Amino acid sequence: MTGHAFILHLTRASARRENAHRLRDSCGLPAEIWPAVDGAAMDDRELRARVDAGLFAPPYPFPLRMGEIGCFLSHRQIWAEILRRDLDHALILEDDAGLDPEYFAQALTLGRDHLDRFGYIQFQTRPARGPARLIATQGACQLLLPQMAGLRTTAQLVTRASAEQLLAASDRFDRPVDTFVQSHWQTGLRPAMILPSGISEIADQLEGSTIQSARKPFLEKLRREWLRGRYRRAVRHASASSAAPDPSHD
């Protein structure tokens, strides 16, 4: 299998540069640092060309932040690059990923062994919310197919076919990339996950997230929490009734 790794790194995020290079050198595949799209530098015309609202149900309840738009476009660039280079698959890592070499080596072997079957495998940092089917193990690592796919795009394996499928479905988008990937009832692609994966989130150790939001008043925070909870319930229902193919039954 022809595999390659891309380390997504925002050029102005200098505090993360050393970690990006460390990931490139220790991820277990030929790798390069990929310059992430800087949402803050985009103009209104670029935004209107990509971002819409209410594209599919359940509707995402929040406007996209500039950093979220840049992050989505960065992943789309890599999906397109997978096709351009005719790669069998790619490992995509974000520059705030922490990597435990022992666990990650097991997780990478497990993921690559089953990648043709599942197409998109997340190296998760959090347990699944709700039911998840155990598919296989490698050492301490478990490959699971959750009913409700996980969030986070810290690290994932993506096949050429899945990259093509996701790219075709996201010419315009209305939600963050992890929330889009979670929506298998829309994309037709059910993400699998590995846990423990040897991947952790270390943004707080690297001067925080590059997707910033202003501090909000207390009542606005309450409103957002209510909207978030309602959206999660709708996602849970959509996941349970999804018509996306189930690779674990093949």
Image: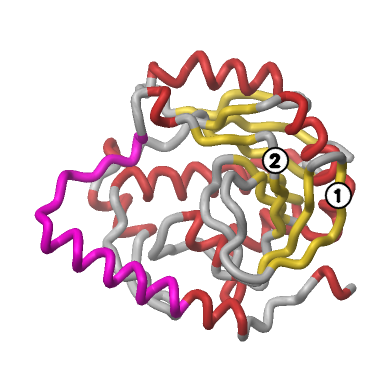
Tell me if label 2 and label 1 are in contact, CB under 8 Å. no
Q: Residues within 10 Å of mark 1 (few under 14, many from 20)?
A: some
Three-letter amino acid code at the position of disc 1: Thr
For label 1, the residue is: 137
Q: Is residue 242 above or below residue 63?
A: below
Give the left or right position of residue 90, taking residue 74 as reference: right
**What residue is rendered at 27% in x and 61% in y?**
63
In this view, the residue in front, 141 or 207, is 141
Kindly tell me whether residue 37 is visible in this rendering. yes
Residue 171, given in percent of the width and then of the height, sits at: 49, 61
**What residue is rendered at 57% in x and 50% in y?**
126
Numbered disc 1: secondary structure: strand
- Residue 4 quadrant: top right
Spatial CA span between label 2 and label 1? 11 Å
Look at the image and tell me in which quarter the C terminus lies.
bottom right
For label 2, the residue is: 197
Kindly tell me whether residue 83 is visible in this rendering. no
Q: Earlier in the sequence, mark 2 or mark 1?
A: 1
User: Which residues, given as a range, are shown in magenta?
Assistant: 209-234
Give the left or right position of residue 217, taking residue 244 as reference: left
**What residue is rendered at 57% in x and 35% in y?**
200
In the rendered image, the residue lying farthest to the front is 140
